[in-house]
């Protein structure tokens, strides 16, 4: 048995698992990587060929099994020195390349052809999904050996035929010309919007390709036709050959698609073709202030959901959606997704019936040079969403994250979330109260927002909490005062956790007494006003990117590295040389940390983005660990921080691992205050102390989503 590491699907053969990976990759696109098929190997690969190369180099045991298979006999020429099924089919392919007619070797199949590609396509489509039996006289191998050998040959067929699509098989497509046109449009769409090739470059490419297929190909086609007719002793008129060659080139589906009047010949025509043939949800412009020409773009969540859930592959993988009887059961043993914790099972909509779970994500990004004169002038706030019903691992894939809205950050500050999120909330209210009809399921399914992932400022703005993090109440999880962060731990249970009833009391007191804020609460959450199944006290989980990798980690790294350098265990130059010369592999090569700046001590930060800081934390023991004494307290802080990071981003938690995480956070706090008594803990240190409880109540999936 083989199990998919991404979705948990169980398959009987390795070839089926490889095909399963390929189908997943075709759906999710470039953002999806291939995991090694062996459970004890954690390697992942960006390309299909890299995975196959890894299997052949590092897991050759499977190939050794195939060599133990018995003798195969060719049913065409009688050659019987073929020891494996792979060798047998390689021998058959030689007959096909010689244009000999070959009958399918499997029982109950009378397929015949003398075309090499057709035979391989037939075998891949008809005989690669199950264990097949050869016709009598071909193989003397027993059933078990045949099964294993077939598995190996199926892998080989996948390697060579992975780019074949059944829609393009000769004689099997009812509208081959239309299929080719759609395929070309798909390739051009990828060039323009994934590889970011300009329209001018695409037009130039199509013009050159049109010239090659037209004028140049006519002469070559004419020569080929004449040669074939001469070789077969046929008499022909040269004018007929010229006309035939011209017609063949002019009727080429590729030329008709990209030619002068073809549907893909210009940017305007391509855009119109994409809209009519692909499931495109166009953005709609919403006016904020017509007088000042202020607006933003919104892509309908409901329309996008209907297109996405019209895909059978997604429905098959979705949890709590594809069948009424497939309700997730609460378990206290493992915490993998949002379906395993208390917050999900307390939700009146998500836990009681099949439903759609949405995770919203809000963050800002700079589209200009952040160091230039346009800094912050064109900063954009993006609202994204993820289908929470997908299995673990899918939330971090770029192709699973969908854009909902784009607005200038300055306009957002001016007009507020209430006005900007109005079209989003309208769609979410319809989804929660009426639902959407899913044609694949044949019924209407309701849904709601599971949670909103954002940085602390964005979360507090939408949730209605105080946005000044130097104030008295800065925690959205409890009612602790900022001054208490330095002396009291969250695990002491002194602080009162915010609940739905307590939050309602705070809002009531604000309204009755007309207070600007109360215990850090300023106003009612924008989403809670309209969504009856969204709770503000459970719907805004912490974001590990902003709390850890862009907050605590660079801050504590700077303090500890500065102390270690002052004690002359190593120099900054030594550390930077180790970083620059280290041989990073795979994804770490892309996310390798940059050399630490000379001003890191004064800035109290090593800089870098989230992935770079994560890499620096993991690899720091390899860089300078041999130079630091084991008993050094500052080094213990860094190793504890590394353990905390590893635990927080773990894909699976148990009761024991959560308890251990709480212990490590408490121990790390004590050591940090002992080594740096004059340094105050940040509010993010306090948020980190809430992580064990929040992971247990099922926001672990949201934390990993934000991280990736």
Image: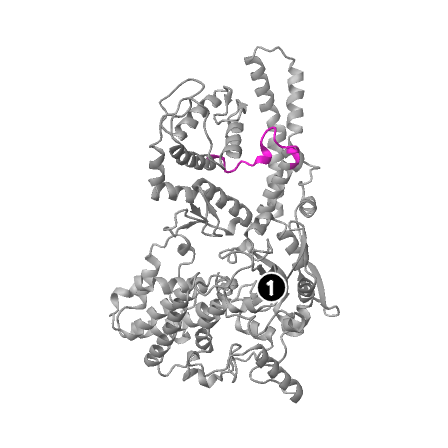
Residue corresponding to mark 1: 352
Q: Is residue 153 magenta?
A: no
Q: Callout 1: helix, strand or loop?
A: loop
Q: Is residue 684 above or below residue 367?
A: below
What is the x, y in percent for residue 499? 55, 78
Q: Relative to residue 427, is residue 518 drawn left or right?
A: left
Q: Callout 1: 10 Å neighbours few (<14), some, many (20+)?
A: some
Height in image: 49 above or below 91? Answer: below
- Residue 506, picture quadrant: bottom right
Q: Position of residue 32 (x, y in %)?
A: 50, 51
Whether residue 442 is visible to the viewer of this picture, yes or no, is yes
Looking at this view, is 602 or 686 the one in front?
686
Relative to residue 677, is residue 648 depicted above or below?
above
Return the residue found at the far right: 291
In the drawing, does residue 523 fall left or right of residue 650?
A: right
Considering the image in quadrants, where does the N terminus appear? top left
The quadrant holding residue 292 is bottom right
Colour convention:
one colour
Residue sitting nearer the eye, 634 or 539: 539
Q: Residue at x 32, y 61 (%)?
A: 577
Q: From this viewpoint, which residue is outermost toward the bottom?
A: 513
| Figure quadrant of residue 294 | bottom right
In this picture, which residue range is highlighted in magenta?
160-178
Q: Residue at x 44, y 67 (%)?
A: 549
Most foreground residue, 577 or 19: 19
**Magenta-drawn stretch contains 166:** yes
Residue 638 image offset from top left, x and y in percent: 34, 70
Please give left or right for residue 593 compared with residue 243 in the image.
left
Residue 598 visible in the picture: no
- Compared across the picture, whether 483 is left or right of 388 comes to left
Percent coordinates x, y for residue 553 in the rendering = 41, 70
């Amino acid at each position: 048995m083989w199990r998919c590491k991404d979705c948990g699907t169980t398959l009987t053969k390795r070839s089926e698992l490889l095909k399963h990976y390929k189908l997943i990759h075709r759906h999710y696109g470039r953002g999806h990587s291939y995991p090694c098929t062996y459970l004890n190997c954690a390697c992942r690969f960006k390309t299909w060929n890299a995975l196959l190369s890894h299997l052949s180099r590092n897991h050759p045991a499977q190939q050794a099994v195939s060599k133990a298979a018995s003798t195969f006999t060719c049913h065409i020429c009688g050659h019987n020195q073929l020891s494996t099924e792979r060798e047998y089919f390689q021998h058959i392919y030689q007959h096909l390349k010689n244009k000999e007619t070959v009958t399918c070797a499997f029982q109950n199949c009378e397929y015949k052809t003398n075309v090499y590609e057709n035979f391989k396509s037939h075998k891949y489509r008809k005989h690669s999904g199950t264990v097949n039996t050869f016709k009598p006289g071909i193989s003397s191998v027993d059933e078990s050996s045949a099964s294993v050998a077939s598995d190996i040959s199926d892998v080989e067929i996948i390697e060579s035929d992975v780019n074949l699509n059944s829609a393009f098989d000769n004689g099997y497509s009812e509208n081959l010309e239309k299929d080719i046109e759609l395929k070309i449009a798909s390739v051009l769409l990828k060039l323009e919007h994934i590889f970011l090739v300009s329209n001018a470059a695409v037009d130039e490419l199509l013009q050159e390709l049109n010239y090659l297929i037209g004028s140049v190909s006519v002469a070559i086609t004419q020569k080929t036709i004449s040669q074939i007719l001469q070789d077969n002793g046929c008499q022909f008129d040269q004018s007929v050959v010229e006309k035939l060659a011209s017609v063949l080139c002019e009727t080429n589906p590729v030329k008709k698609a990209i030619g002068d009047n073809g549907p893909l010949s210009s940017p305007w025509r391509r855009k119109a073709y994409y809209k009519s043939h692909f499931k495109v949800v166009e953005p709609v412009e919403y006016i904020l202030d017509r007088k000042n020409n202020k607006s933003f773009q919104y892509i309908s969540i409901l329309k996008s959901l209907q297109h996405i859930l019209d895909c059978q592959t997604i429905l098959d993988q979705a949890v709590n959606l594809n069948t009424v009887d497939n309700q997730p059961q609460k378990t206290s043993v493992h915490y993998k997704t949002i379906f395993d914790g208390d917050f999900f099972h307390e939700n009146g909509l998500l836990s009681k019936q099949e439903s759609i779970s949405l995770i919203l994500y809000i963050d800002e990004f700079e589209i200009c040079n952040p160091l230039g004169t346009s800094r912050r002038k064109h900063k954009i706030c993006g609202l994204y969403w993820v289908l929470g019903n997908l299995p673990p691992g899918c939330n971090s894939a770029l192709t699973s994250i969908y854009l909902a809205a784009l607005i200038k950050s300055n306009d957002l500050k001016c007009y507020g979330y209430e006005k900007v999120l109005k079209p989003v909330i309208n769609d979410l209210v319809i989804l929660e109260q009426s639902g959407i009809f899913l044609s694949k399921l044949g019924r209407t399914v309701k849904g709601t927002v599971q949670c909103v992932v954002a940085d602390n400022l964005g979360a507090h703005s939408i949730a209605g909490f105080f946005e000044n993090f130097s104030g008295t109440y800065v925690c959205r999880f409890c009612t602790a005062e900022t001054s208490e962060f330095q002396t009291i731990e969250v695990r002491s249970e002194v602080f009162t956790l915010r609940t739905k009833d307590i939050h309602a009391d705070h809002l009531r007191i604000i309204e009755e007494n007309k207070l600007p804020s109360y215990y850090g609460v300023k106003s009612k959450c924008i989403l809670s006003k309209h969504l009856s199944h969204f709770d503000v006290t459970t719907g805004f989980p912490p974001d590990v990117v902003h709390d850890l990798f862009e907050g605590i980690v660079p801050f504590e790294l700077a303090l500890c590295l500065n102390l270690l350098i002052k004690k002359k265990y190593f120099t900054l130059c030594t550390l930077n040389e180790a970083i620059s010369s280290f041989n990073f592999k795979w994804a770490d090569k892309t996310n390798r940390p940059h050399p630490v700046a000379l001003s890191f001590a004064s800035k109290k930060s090593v800089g870098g983005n989230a992935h770079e800081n994560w890499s620096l934390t993991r690899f720091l023991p390899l860089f300078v660990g041999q130079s630091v004494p084991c008993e050094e307290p500052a080094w213990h802080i860094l190793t504890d921080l590394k353990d905390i990071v590893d635990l927080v981003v773990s894909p699976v938690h148990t009761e024991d691992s959560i308890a251990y995480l709480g212990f490590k956070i408490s121990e790390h706090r004590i050591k940090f205050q002992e080594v740096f008594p004059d340094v105050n803990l940040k509010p993010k240190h306090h948020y980190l102390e809430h992580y064990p409880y929040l992971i247990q109540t099922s926001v672990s999936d949201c934390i990993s989503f934000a991280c990736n």
